[in-house]
Image: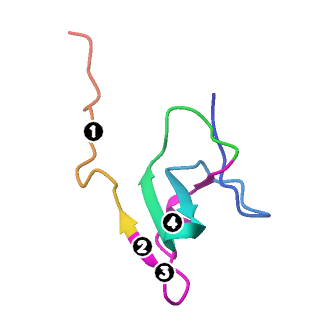
């Protein structure tokens, strides 16, 4: 199932998942999770690169640094 960006008025495909924990003042950015979590936010690339943590909070980027891209296969 296709998931869209959680930001209002944005209809782009989601590419990351943002979660947070108030008690630890911590924000996590992960690759898009396999399942939708009602306590997380799915964001597109455009909104994902703009994420900053609130003052006094820590931001942890846990995304995989390498994206696997499969080349198009041609029938031969």
Taking the spot 49% from the left edge, 40% from the top edge, the residue there is 33
Q: Earlier in the sequence, mark 4 or mark 2?
A: 4
Q: Secondary structure at mark 1?
A: loop
Between the C-alphas of marks 1 and 3, the distance is: 33 Å
> Looking at the image, do the residues carrying marks 3 and 2 touch, with CB atoms under 8 Å apart?
yes
Compute the Cα span from label 2 to label 1. Answer: 27 Å
Magenta segment boundaries in residue numbering: 39-59
* Residue 49 colored in magenta in the image: yes
Q: Which mark lies nearer to you, 1 or 4?
A: 4
Task: Label 4, secondary structure: give it.
Answer: helix
In the figure, 49 relative to 75: above or below?
Answer: below
Dot 4 or dot 3, earlier in sequence:
4
Tag shown at residue 59:
2
Disc 1 marks which residue?
69
Mark 3: secondary structure: loop
The quarter of the picture where residue 18 lies is bottom right
Residue sitting nearer the eye, 30 or 11: 30
In percent of the image, x 34 and y 54: which residue is there?
A: 63
Find the distance from the CA under tag 4 to the CA under tag 3.
Answer: 17 Å
List x then y, in percent, for residue 20. 55, 62
Q: CA distance from mark 3 to mark 2?
A: 7 Å
């Amino acid at each position: 199932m296709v998931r869209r960006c959680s930001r209002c008025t944005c209809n782009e495909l989601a590419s990351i998942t943002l979660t947070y924990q108030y008690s630890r003042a911590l924000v996590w950015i992960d690759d898009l999770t396999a399942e939708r979590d009602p306590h997380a936010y799915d964001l597109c690339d455009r909104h994902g690169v703009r994420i900053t943590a609130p003052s006094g909070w820590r931001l942890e980027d846990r995304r995989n640094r390498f994206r696997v891209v499969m080349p198009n296969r041609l029938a031969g």
